[in-house]
Amino acid sequence: MFGRFTDPTAEAFSALQHEPIVLYTVLTIMVLGILVFTVITLCGWWGTLWRNWITTVDHKRIGIMYVVLALVMLVRGFADALMMRLHQAMALGNESAGYLPPDHYDQIFTAHGVIMIFFMATPLLFGLFNYILPLQIGARDVAFPFLNNLGFWITFAGAVLINISLGVGNFGRVGWLAYPPLSELSGSPDTGVDYYLWSLQLSGIATTISAINFVATIIKMRVSGMTMMKLPVFCWTALVANVLILMIYPVLTVALALLIGDRYLGMHFFTNDGGGNPMVWINYVWIFGHPEVYVLVLPAFGILSEVVPTFSSKCLFGYTSMIWAILVILVLSFLVWAHHFFTMGGGISVNTFFSVATMVIAVPTGVKIFNWLFTMYKGRIRLEPPMLWCMGMIFTFVGGGLTGVMLSIAPADWQFHNSLFLVAHFHHTIIGGVVFAYLAGLVYWFPKAFGIKLNRALGIASFWCWFIGFYFSFFPLYILGLMGATRRLQHYIEPSWQPYFIIAMIGALIIALGILFTVLQLLLVVWYGIKHKGRLPVRENDPWGDTRTLEWSISSPPPPYNFAILPSVTTLDAYWHMKTEGTQCKPTRFSRIHMPSNTSAGFWVGILALILGFALVWHIWWLVAFSFIGVISVIILHSFIGDHCGYYLSAMEVQKTEDAFTAAYLKAGGKEI
Amino acid sequence: MENLKKVLGILSVLTLMSLLSGCDVAVLSPTGLVAKAQRDLIIISLILMLCIVIPIMFAVIFFAIKYHASKKDTEYLPDWGISHKVEFFMWSIPICVVSILAMLSAYFTYKYEPSKPLDYAVATDNNPLRINAVALEWKWLFIYPEYGIATINEIYAPTGRQVALQLTAQDTINAFWVPKLGSVLYAMPQMNAKLHLLSEENGRFPGMSANYSGDGFAGMHFTWHSVSNGDFDNWVSRVRRSGNQLNYVTYLELTKKSKSNPVTYFSGVDRDLYYRVVNRCVAEGSKCNEELMRLAAARSLWGELCSVFDVRESIAPVNIRE
Amino acid sequence: MNTSVRIETINEDHHDNGSTQVFGFWIYILQDLFLFATLFANFAVFSSTYDGGAAGKDFINLPFVMVETFLLLFSSISCGFAMVNLQTNNLQGTRLSLQITFILGLAFVGMEVYEFMHLIHQGVIPSVSTYWSAFFVLVATHGVHVIAGLIWMMCMFVHLSRYKLSRDNRIRMACLSLFWHFLDIVWIGVFTVVYLLGAL
């Protein structure tokens, strides 16, 4: 009846009973949950929440939900990171050193990696895609609004499932890519790896659905006149990232499915017996895993290519070079996966090929860096927070590239492999490259979504904390790696390592301060929202000035239909040219606009998928059958009774919205056009 | 003010140096032949890359100051977006640097391929010391096939003599790493990976597993003692005096999980134990992988095409020296 | 502030673009192709790991598989006829062709289930060896896709009787036929790699 709950070896509630840290965390989350629930009930927000958010198919609202999910997961993943740093700073000696037993420590580093990549970076990415991409290509929505909603709720289900493992059962103790045979039943008989497998399957399905949506959106929904070579670079990177997703996530899905076969059906893909071969898994996950790095970092490049020109008041240098560099990376990213295991004994030819291919990727990446530099050259640079993040990114990312090239030299990698040098390197590129750029994007496009900028002083403070904190946390790790410290150590015996771990911990605390400042920025906006009774006033369209792309041509926040009149585009940087050539004009006649209808199907599929995942982890087969049939039924029902016709916003309503914007715009001191 | 800056600068450089020199940075102060080559490679590649990276870092800050919006008198070219000259250098500089590094990488990959005996050692005509290593949960078993002895978590090897290691694992994937000597290599179940190392100096070098393998992973360290020939012989006879025997039964005992194991000696080892570990047929009644492959080869075309039979050659039992 | 007007570009029906939906479905098919490619690669890697047990060859019944193959090939033809009838606005013909497709597909699934039961009955189950794990995963993944297609067709019958040859139904039919032909092509791969080459 209750599957593995009745099996004492599955340790369903042992963490809650024996680990005070887990208990207090779960209690805090529950108290917070109850608090939020009470506030929503008292204020009577359930109705709006349901109508305007949960069932919405508006890409802008879904984008905001993705970003909120990502920020919550950032806090979760960062809490894991802080715990690890704190533990390692104390972990000199034997297993009882520090405050975390291996069992708990191993779960934390696994969860940190999985959450940061799959439930922080990916949702943040999709949040930005969702909000910005349709606006940049002059579309009124994405190609498949319902799939967009569905994708969000399945991602949400995956994120909730992975966080349930905090209290119920435990999480995998296998590292973020779960190498077998450790992740097989022989190495991890409890629920940890099952949570890993099912939450990643959910996230994978959601990511694939969203990627199909965005590729179709970019290819089919561009506004008239916007040919591929007039597409903003952010859209280009989004296109390439989504194409990559479509090519690599199936590999991950298959790899996970095969491991599921091993664990649930007694198959023998990656086991030591029965003919299995664990090394095959390592190939699969890295054929997925390496392009995944580019899925994350290419849009980061795209963001820089939008922000740097804006704050340099210049056009992007070498647009064509940039696009070619992106396409070269798309191809090359598939030819380098074996550099993650130069130490497997691949032989001379394999190692040489993958070593050289990896270095070749440094070429298009270097070209991008030069592009941004020459964009700044002879510009008028304004050091607003988004630009600071971008400069921080360029400055830090080239360092990460440097160590990346060092690691790509196979014989040198034989000394770096799996050491803290490697850990420092990929945090160097992911924090320095991806996180800084995403935060730049977040700060840059925030006024588009909410009408007001984030607090500038706090933003600058946040940047410097992240920037300095980063160097303090990860430079010690480079040195530790060279001293012979491997990753994932629960304790160590070299006293000379401890000072470095302590410095790294201080660095992590500085980054924590940076996150705190970001949270304060957001709280200020919430305060502002409360002051205005939840109705953010519509503001000027172009708060940064010298912006170049179409999203800035409409009000902030944009109306539900985005563009009252679809713009027509003749050049790259369409909005910049409209401004400089004065070809913008004020429409006087509007027509009705077709809008898609809200639907709750995505939400129900998400909830049922969550139940399905949970039931599968705990082997509650009747619930598996029930929720699986539920998912299928909801989708079939949606095809019959769902509202596919949408509705029309009348010309009058459009006129009213646009007039309100014009009035607000003029009141804020805007010029009449 | 200027002086203060200077003092601060000197102080920070000094702290950095003392931090680095106060302790032993193993990879940068190697004692092994392979590791020394790797250190050189690391330093060369670092310098080459710095030649590009430092100007970029400098340029970011310099441009931000020079072209700051407050400086209205500097040149401003809002529409300057294409310059084939600049773009030519933009592509060609990275290509040049990468070409140099690629050649370096290819050369060193060829020269220090772990499975190849080291050139230096071949030239001096020395006969490698053979050690077969098994990664167990969570300890290292080192078998000396020529001496018929084995140890847990301890290696003794004569300085200046090439060591030909063969690595495998019982349960989970591990990696063998002695930072002072160089080259990590995976120890994988069902696989026999070959690694050649050579220490040029006497000393005690910490070694560890470099691939996470579960609960007791952090405690999986061992020591590599590089000693003179005489000391090595003494050590061998010391090991031989121990009463422990390593046979199938005691090996299966060893495969049970245990953490932070003390050094243990075995004075006798079953001759084909390592072969059976690699082929997963230590347990009674189990068929060796190689045998299974032969069966498959007899069965179908694919079995024939996919079977690799180099295993017997290299890990066959050898005659024990007295 | 607002952008230039060109009345002819005003597109009210921004969402109802059928070609976008079919295009989206093409993208889905392409990513599914990568999924199958991985499974085929997986099968190739493990194509001789019998673990001392039965080889695929011992159980492959080529005439039986040929019948399966022809069932699926003919179902593809009838699916094509369904689309031809759709083009000529012949609802009855569309329905009939789709019914034939459904029956042929069902027969295919029936034969595959029979084959699996037969194997399991003789003790050849996925846990016997990696070869059989890979065999069952690859063939069953295709089978599950076919079943999904059959469920889709059942829904399609209801859609056809409710909405006749509406625009939405035409898009649905276009996607369904794409899906069905795709499964046919994948089956050709399965037939060749697993059965024909496996019999060597």
Image (cartoon, coloured by chain):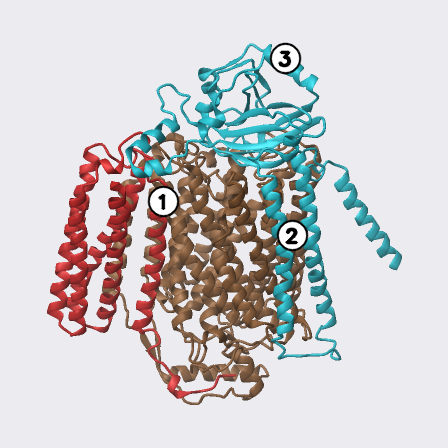
Chain colours: A brown, B cyan, C red
Q: Position of residue B163 (x, y in %)?
A: 61, 27
Residue appearing at x 28%, y 47% in the figure: C193
Q: Is residue C37 above or below residue A370?
A: above
Q: Amino acid at mark 1?
A: Asn
Instruction: Give the Cα separation between the discs numbered 2 and 1.
Output: 41 Å
Q: What residue did someone put label 1 on?
A: C42
Residue A3 visible in rendering? no
Q: Is residue B32 above or below residue B252?
A: below
Q: Secondary structure at mark 3?
A: helix
Q: Secondary structure at mark 2?
A: helix
Q: Amino acid at mark 3?
A: Arg
Residue appearing at x 73%, y 79% in the figure: B72
Mark 1 neighbour class, 10 Å CA radius: few under 14, some 14 to 19, many 20 or more: many
Q: What residue did someone put label 2 on?
A: A470
Residue A78 visible in rendering? yes
Instruction: Give the Cα separation between the discs numbered 1 and 3.
Output: 50 Å
